[in-house]
Image (cartoon, rainbow, N blue to C red):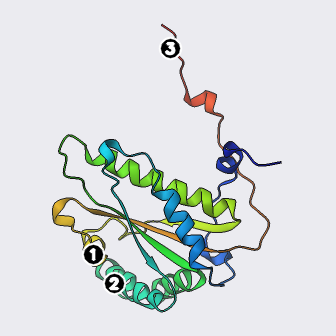
């Protein structure tokens, strides 16, 4: 029996890179995730999501960029460097997430950011549906102008980096989900 979309949503999990096998996934899997991202809702068809994919030798460039930005904020620290390196190396692909600000001044920043978040959720659902690990991380520099510009976007026009989606092969038991409370604790119906 085919799973419902609700089942996929309920089974989406954060699985961090330390749980990945380190294997390299086929780029086609990432393309499917990106296609799903492109169908996220967007006000005024601004489609503000932007992505830069790091894999293979590109991962070393990402390690150096992240550490450079981390050093600027926290100073040199071998433990932090090792953590950055391990997170990137264990991942097959790292998707830098960005928001390209639209030209329509009537569409507020928050709606553009929400569209990007919806795009990330779509990618994450595809990854989870394929049994892959995925982890959205911003860290201390994830929204910085320095990262935004280093990734080829333009912070001066309102573009913003929004962290990274780390993706990798996961062979462990699928984690159980939990919520602190049910949806009924977060909803109020008004029938007039």
Extreme top residue here?
192
Among the 4 quarters of the image, the one containing residue 4: top right
Please tell me the numbered disc located at residue 71.
2
> Considering only order in the chain, which callout, 3 or 2, is on the residue closer to the N terminus?
2
- Disc 3 target residue: 190
Among the 4 quarters of the image, the one containing residue 170: bottom right
The answer to whether marks 2 and 3 mark residues whose Cβ atoms lie closer than 8 Å is no
Task: Answer left or right for 168 relative to 121.
Answer: right
* Mark 1 element type: loop
Q: Residues within 10 Å of mark 3 (few under 14, many from 20)?
A: few
* Mark 2 element type: helix
- In depth, the one of 79 and 17 nearer the eye is 17
- Residue in the picture at 47% in, 52% down: 39
The alpha-carbon separation of the residues under discs 1 and 3 comes to 46 Å
Residue 41, x across and y down, in percent: 43, 45
- Residue in the picture at 39% in, 81% down: 66
- Disc 1 target residue: 152
Q: In this rendering, does residue 104 appear at all?
A: yes
Asked if residue 106 is positioned above or below residue 191 in the image, the reply reads below
* Mark 3 element type: loop
> Considering only order in the chain, which callout, 3 or 1, is on the residue closer to the N terminus?
1
Task: Answer left or right for 179 relative to 34.
Answer: right
Task: Answer left or right for 151 relative to 57.
Answer: left
Task: Answer left or right for 21 relative to 81.
Answer: right
Q: In this rendering, does residue 14 appear at all?
A: no
Residue 154, x across and y down, in percent: 21, 68
The alpha-carbon separation of the residues under discs 2 and 1 comes to 21 Å
Between tags 2 and 3, which lies in front?
3
């Amino acid at each position: 029996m085919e799973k419902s979309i609700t089942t996929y949503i309920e089974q989406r999990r954060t699985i961090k890179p330390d749980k990945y096998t380190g294997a390299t996934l086929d780029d086609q899997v990432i393309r499917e995730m990106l296609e799903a991202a492109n169908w996220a809702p967007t006000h005024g068809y601004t489609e503000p999501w932007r992505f830069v994919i790091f894999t293979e030798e590109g991962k070393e460039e990402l390690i150096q960029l992240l550490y450079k930005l981390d050093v600027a904020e926290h100073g040199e620290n071998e433990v932090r460097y090792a953590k950055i390196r391990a997170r990137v190396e264990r991942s097959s692909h790292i998707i830098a997430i960005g928001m390209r600000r639209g030209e329509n001044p009537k569409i507020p920043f928050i709606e553009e950011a929400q569209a990007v978040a919806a795009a990330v959720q779509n990618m994450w659902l595809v990854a989870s549906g394929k049994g892959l690990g995925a982890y959205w991380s911003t860290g201390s520099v994830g929204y910085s102008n320095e990262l935004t510009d280093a990734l080829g976007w333009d912070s001066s026009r309102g573009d913003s980096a929004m962290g990274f989606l780390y993706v990798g092969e996961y062979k462990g038991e699928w984690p159980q989900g939990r919520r602190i409370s049910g949806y009924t604790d977060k909803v109020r119906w008004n029938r007039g």
